[in-house]
Amino acid sequence: MNRGTRIWLAAGGALLTVGALALVWTNAPGALRPAGTHWAAGASGSSADDDGSAGPSGSASASASASASAGPSAHSGFVHPGVLLDRAQLDFMRGKVQAGAQPWASAYNALRSSASPSGAATPRADVDCGSHSVPDNGCSDERGDALAAYGDALVWYVTRDNRYADAAIRIMDAWSATLKTHTNSNAPLQTGWAGAGWAKAAELIRSTVPAWPNAGRFAAMLRSAYLPVLLQGSGANGNWELIMTDALMGIAVFLDDRTSFNRAVSLWRGRVPAYIYLKSDGPAPKSPPGRAKTGASLTGYWFGQTTFVDGVAQETCRDFGHTAMGFNAAFHAAETARIQGVDLWGEQKTRLAAGLEFHASYELGAAVPSWLCGGHVTLGTGGYWEVGYNALHTRLGMDLPNTAKLLASRRPVSSDNHSSAYETLTSYANPA
């Protein structure tokens, strides 16, 4: 997959330091570009990390049949496939592409043009990720390979072309034969980003391909190199813990690990109300559970914001890019939980909708009042939020006019080169 040409997020700062953010849009003809220089078209290469605080031989082929396998049974009470997408959603997507319907067809064509059946991967034993991607020893490679495997898996599901299933398997086998650990200051976030991508790819392949001989080895990698980090959560900016929660929930489903799944649900239920404010919370935002912040400490954590209205978020006054990524991770986890019978959408639909509409209004050009971030915000929500809009509007019937207008200007979306990809294809107007 040609991943070097598709980036959104390009820089960050220390754990609680406002970092510069550069967002580059992916193949969305006529995409609305926010004022300023957040998006620079045609960027290439790896991207910087968020906050700062060739495969080995012996890889087994999928030997995929022309029709998708029924996959593993729900012997532990989990639905498979069940990470972000279930079979009905996948079939809806496939049907739209086969019918040539828009925007699914153009979104799929963009994916197909960048996907590759080569299965090339760049695994490392130690993925060493520092602040501002210094160093970047395998970090962008790992994230990119995870999303490449996911893209190949989606192409396989649409076309039943065995080459793409085999390619996804070769990528995952290369990493499971090599990776041991993540190190340096961005290791927890890297574990979340890459873990979310791996979970989507692995779940789709294992659930639809008749044979993946090294699936057990891949599961062992997730259990040893990802779960111990993800289970701890994070006290950094909220996008960290939400991204880690998304990865934890997806990995738990793939592993049929009910204890880890329940931990992910608990982290989500604690972090989301502490990340997006509603006036029903009281005069001040909620503190992250187990990481008490009050007074000046809480104000600093919210980047100096002292006036609170429905939808403002913990990182709004940092920048909209990190905020959008945090929202999207929350949406991913909520969607996976829904598939598995836990209605997180219903629990926080008002809060999530308020967050979307609040930020979308400024992305669309609303004047920034003096009480918000000192009268200046850093825009750039990229191509996120299709999953959230689909759940809240298509499925739950909530009116989100700002979000609708914003997303319509940016479809179809491709990949953020971190943990989100191809969501116009998979989640636009998907009622399943």
Image (cartoon, rainbow, N blue to C red):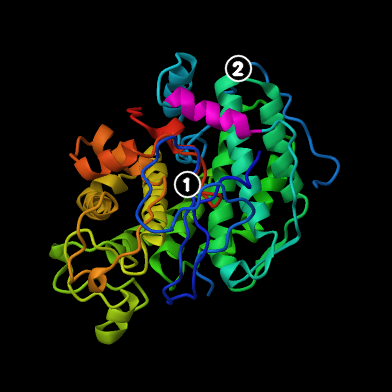
Q: Farthest residue toward the right?
A: 57
Callouts 1 and 2 close, C-beta under 8 Å: no
Quadrant holding the C terminus: top left
Amino acid carrying mark 2 in the image: Ser
Task: State left or right for residue 149 relative to residue 79.
Answer: right
Question: Can you see residue 400?
Answer: no
Answer whether residue 111 is magenta in the image: yes
Q: Earlier in the sequence, mark 1 or mark 2?
A: 1
- Quarter of the image holding residue 184? bottom right
Task: State left or right for residue 221 relative to residue 95.
Answer: right
Residue sitting at 41 percent across and 74 percent down?
A: 18
Q: Nearer the viewer, mark 1 or mark 2?
A: 1
Residue sitting at 64 percent across and 70 percent down?
A: 134
Answer whether residue 399 is magenta in the image: no
Q: Residues within 10 Å of mark 1 (few under 14, many from 20)?
A: many
- Quarter of the image holding residue 191? bottom right
Task: State left or right for residue 216 relative to residue 428.
Answer: right
Amino acid carrying mark 1 in the image: Trp
Q: Nearer the viewer, residue 283 or 405?
A: 405
**Image position of 69 with respect to 235: above or below:** above
* Location of residue 78 in the rendering, given as x and y in whole percent from the top left corner: 47, 39
Which residue is label 2 attached to? Answer: 67
Q: Nearer the viewer, residue 200 or 365?
A: 365
Specify the principal SS of the magenta part: helix
SS at badge 2: loop
**Image position of 11 with respect to 304: above or below:** above
Number of dots carrying numbers: 2
Residue sitting at 27 percent across and 32 percent down?
A: 394
Q: What range is drawn magenta here?
A: 104-115
Check residue 25 in the rendering and tell me which mark sits there, or answer none. Answer: 1
* Location of residue 238 in the rendering, given as x and y in whole percent from the top left corner: 39, 66
